[in-house]
Image (cartoon, helix red, strand yellow):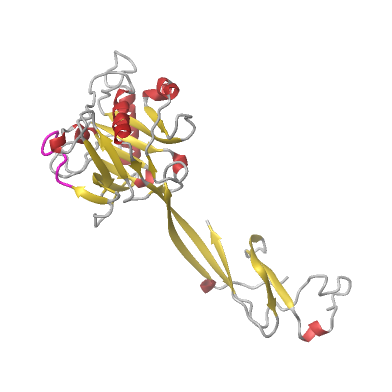
């Protein structure tokens, strides 16, 4: 066995971005949406509803939740304690996760004041490896009056990316697959909104979409779909159910996932004078340590089949197998590239 110390320029690091369909089966678009009556009626149904791709209820695609800073829109935990309900818990959860401050408020782009309530679409963790792929989303929503909109993110048109505690932040706007079609209609000055076009936030690094209830509740002339958020106490799943109905009626949700694969390339260079002898029993006598065949003394013929990478303590860290044995003697040099993905 022979060893050779690697130099700094023998290492090269490369990073490649790989995209794939987000939904079950690596499909980019899903058109079927199911809820489980068992899950909705259970304790978790007070906070969110899971959306499945088929009525076997095995593969969760995403979850829908509703948050309200005042606890409206869901039943109070205790009738004598105002403002404490599943919707206030959801609001506080995402305030901590996204804003990192329990006293902060959600103020979406163009809004003249903080938004007291919002809808959340949270993609199931099994659907992606690293993050959502900005610019790939098309979410079609149809309101109870038949008004519909296509929503995407503005990642393809912004010059500077914004960040918060949840990572990258993009605005949700009208459009498809990253192509913005309308940035001047949302709110129309009503519901506390200026003509900014923002329907909420697209947060690819935590696979979450937060949609402003005010924007979706605007009428069609103001860019909304009149979703009709309930601001009084009611059954817990009523507001998530309204967004679910809008998604079902829109019947199309397209998005891709994104993963960065980092590769270490290690270049091993056996020079002409190196790695020409072997400790294999067919080459050297195990009892005397002598070369068995005298021709191999001055003109050895060996085959390289394996490259082992060791640390400074001679501990084996990785093994690379060559696709076929590589002939090596004093007249040949080789360059073996080892690729480590992680």
Magenta span contains residue 188 = yes
Give the farthest residue toward the top.
80
Q: Residue at x 32, y 30 (%)?
A: 244
Quadrant where the image shows the N terminus: bottom right
How many numbered marks does the figure carry?
0
Q: Is residue 324 left or right of residue 149?
A: right
Q: Is residue 333 among the parts visible in the rendering?
A: yes
Magenta segment, principal secondary structure? loop
Q: State which quadrant residue 150 falls in.
A: top left
Magenta span contains residue 303 = no
Query: 140 or 262: which is nearer to us?
Result: 140
Q: Note whether 211 is above or below 75 in the view shown.
A: below
The percent position of residue 9, horizontal first and vertical second, equals: 51, 73
Q: Note whether 69 is above or below 133 in the view shown.
A: above
Q: Note whether 256 is above or below 317 in the view shown.
A: above
Q: Is residue 100 among the parts visible in the rendering?
A: no
Query: 308 or 325: which is nearer to us?
Result: 325
Q: Which residue is drawn at 10% across and 38% down?
A: 189
The percent position of residue 109, horizontal first and vertical second, equals: 20, 43
The percent position of residue 285, horizontal first and vertical second, equals: 86, 73
Q: In this view, does 189 lie to the left or right of 66?
A: left
Q: Which residue is drawn at 43% across and 38% down?
A: 124
Query: 146 or 90: which is nearer to us?
Result: 146
Stretch of the chain drawn in magenta = 183-192
Q: Which residue is drawn at 84% across and 84% down?
A: 294
Give the farthest residue toward the right.
287
The percent position of residue 197, horizontal first and vertical second, equals: 18, 44
Q: State which quadrant residue 222 falls in.
A: top left
């Amino acid at each position: 066995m022979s060893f050779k110390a690697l130099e700094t320029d023998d290492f090269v690091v490369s990073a490649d971005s790989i995209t794939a369909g987000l939904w079950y089966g690596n499909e980019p678009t899903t058109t079927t949406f199911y809820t489980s009556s068992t899950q909705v009626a259970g304790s978790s149904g007070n906070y969110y509803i899971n959306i499945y791709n088929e009525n076997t209820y095995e593969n969760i695609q995403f979850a829908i939740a509703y948050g309200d800073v005042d606890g409206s829109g869901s039943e109070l935990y205790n009738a004598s304690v105002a403002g404490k309900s599943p919707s206030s818990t959801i609001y506080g959860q995402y305030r901590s996760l996204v804003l990192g401050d329990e006293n902060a408020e959600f103020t979406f782009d163009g809004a003249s004041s903080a938004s007291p309530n919002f809808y959340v679409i949270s993609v199931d963790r099994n659907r992606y490896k690293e993050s959502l792929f900005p610019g790939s989303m098309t979410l079609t929503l149809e309101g109870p009056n038949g008004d519909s909109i296509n929503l995407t993110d503005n990642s393809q048109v912004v010059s500077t990316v914004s960040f918060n505690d949840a990572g990258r932040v993009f605005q949700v706007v009208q459009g498809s697959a990253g192509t913005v079609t309308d940035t001047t209609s949302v709110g129309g000055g009503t519901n506390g909104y200026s003509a900014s076009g923002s329907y909420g936030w697209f947060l690819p690094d935590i696979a979450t979409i937060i949609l402003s209830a005010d924007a979706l509740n605007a009428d069609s002339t103001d860019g909304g779909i009149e979703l009709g958020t309930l601001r009084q106490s009611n059954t817990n799943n009523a507001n998530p159910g309204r967004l679910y109905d809008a998604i079902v009626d829109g019947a199309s949700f397209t998005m891709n996932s994104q993963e960065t694969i980092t590769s270490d390339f290690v270049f091993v260079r056996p020079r002409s004078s190196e790695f020409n002898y072997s400790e294999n029993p067919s080459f050297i006598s195990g009892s005397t340590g002598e070369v068995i065949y005298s021709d191999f003394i001055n003109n050895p013929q060996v085959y390289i089949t394996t490259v082992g990478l060791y640390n400074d303590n001679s501990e084996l860290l990785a093994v690379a197998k060559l696709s076929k044995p590589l002939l090596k003697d004093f007249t040949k040099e080789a360059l073996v590239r080892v690729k480590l993905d992680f």
